[in-house]
Image (cartoon, rainbow, N blue to C red):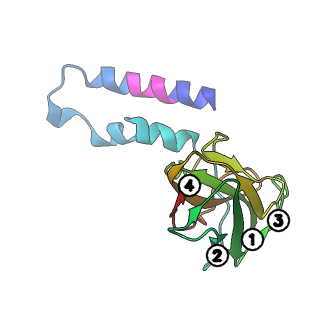
Amino acid sequence: MHTTRIAATLLALSLGLSACGKPAAENSTADKDSAPSNAQDEAKLTAIARTLSPPGARVFFITPADGDRVTNPISIEFGIEGMSVTKAGDEQPNSGHHHLLIDTDLPDPGLPIPATPNHVHFGDGSTSTEISLDPGTHSLQMLLGDHRHIPHDPPVVSEPISITVE
């Protein structure tokens, strides 16, 4: 992968140098499209192939419900339809494992889901957990990852919910 980036950078440099001193009309648009020109193009080079999700697959919270007022420890139960839950590393069709997103946006769908305090992995195949959060309002969202912790295509993601910890 590192070699691909170097080759793309060298190609972009050579194309840029070959266009130096020429009027804009002489600069070929084909040359501009042949090498990464911005961060989005670079991300495409490093993205990983995604596992397809079946139509209608979904994940959701059984508990808590959107708007609930809760106390620690907070019991969370994950629901899934149209797919099955497996452990990370188990490559089976129409399956994945849960990730709980706490007070964060969805991660890049072309990359593995990060492992941070805001991206909690359940690679053991768990469908429930207990967590503790600081008092206040928090957003929770679920995201299914494939056997490599990469979101499916299209992503199997819940609607975000908001809870208040008292």
The residue mark sitting in front, 2 or 4, is 4
**Element type at mark 4:** loop
User: Relative to residue 126, is residue 71 drawn left or right?
Assistant: left
- What residue is pinned by disc 2? 57
User: Of the residues shown, which amino acid type is indicated by label 1?
Assistant: Asn
Q: Mainly helix, strand or loop, the magenta region?
A: helix
Q: Earlier in the sequence, mark 2 or mark 4?
A: 2
- The x and y percentages for residue 126 are 81, 60
* CB contact under 8 Å: marks 3 and 2: no
Splitting the image into 4 quarters, where does residue 25 fall? top left
**Element type at mark 2:** loop
Label for residue 166? 4
Residue at figure coordinates x 36%, y 42% from the top left: 33
Q: Is residue 81 above or below residue 97?
A: below
Q: Nearer the viewer, residue 132 or 102?
A: 132
The residue mark sitting in front, 3 or 2, is 2
